[in-house]
Amino acid sequence: MRESFNALGGETAPDRIILQCGSGVTACHNALAMEIAGMHGAALYPGSWSEWSTDPGCPVATGAKP
């Protein structure tokens, strides 16, 4: 698990990682998996995309990918 998470975050320290997903449920599983893998301290944004996308003050990228 540690290798998989490191592949996503590179050498980012776990306590500098914020986990989010569509509703917060899957992000909880990732937080638990990181703890089990010895990668302690990741934060969870429980509102995730469902909350972020409904707040008009939060930035959202739209349009075609570069």
Image (cartoon, grey):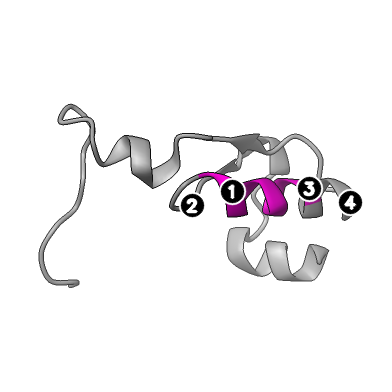
Q: Are marks 4 and 3 in contact (CB under 8 Å)?
A: yes
In this view, 6 is above or below 26: below
- Amino acid type at image mark 4: Ile
Q: Is residue 20 left or right of residue 61?
A: right
First of labels 2, 4 by sequence position: 2
Q: Which residue is mark 3?
A: 32
Q: Secondary structure at mark 4?
A: helix
In this view, 54 is above or below 39: above
Q: Secondary structure at mark 2?
A: loop
Q: Secondary structure at mark 3?
A: helix
Real-space Cα distance between discs 1 and 2? Answer: 7 Å
Q: Are marks 1 and 2 in contact (CB under 8 Å)?
A: yes
* Highlighted range, magenta: 24-32
Task: Give neighbour class at mark 4: few <14, some 14-19, many 20+ (Cα, 10 Å).
Answer: few
First of labels 1, 3 by sequence position: 1
Residue 38 visible from this viewpoint: no
Real-space Cα distance between discs 2 and 4? Answer: 20 Å
- Amino acid type at image mark 3: Leu
In front: mark 1 or mark 3? 1
First of labels 4, 1 by sequence position: 1
Q: Is residue 29 magenta?
A: yes
In front: mark 2 or mark 4? 2
- Residue occupying image coordinates x 23% and y 36%: 54
Task: Report the front residue among 26 and 65.
Answer: 26
Q: Which residue is mark 1?
A: 25
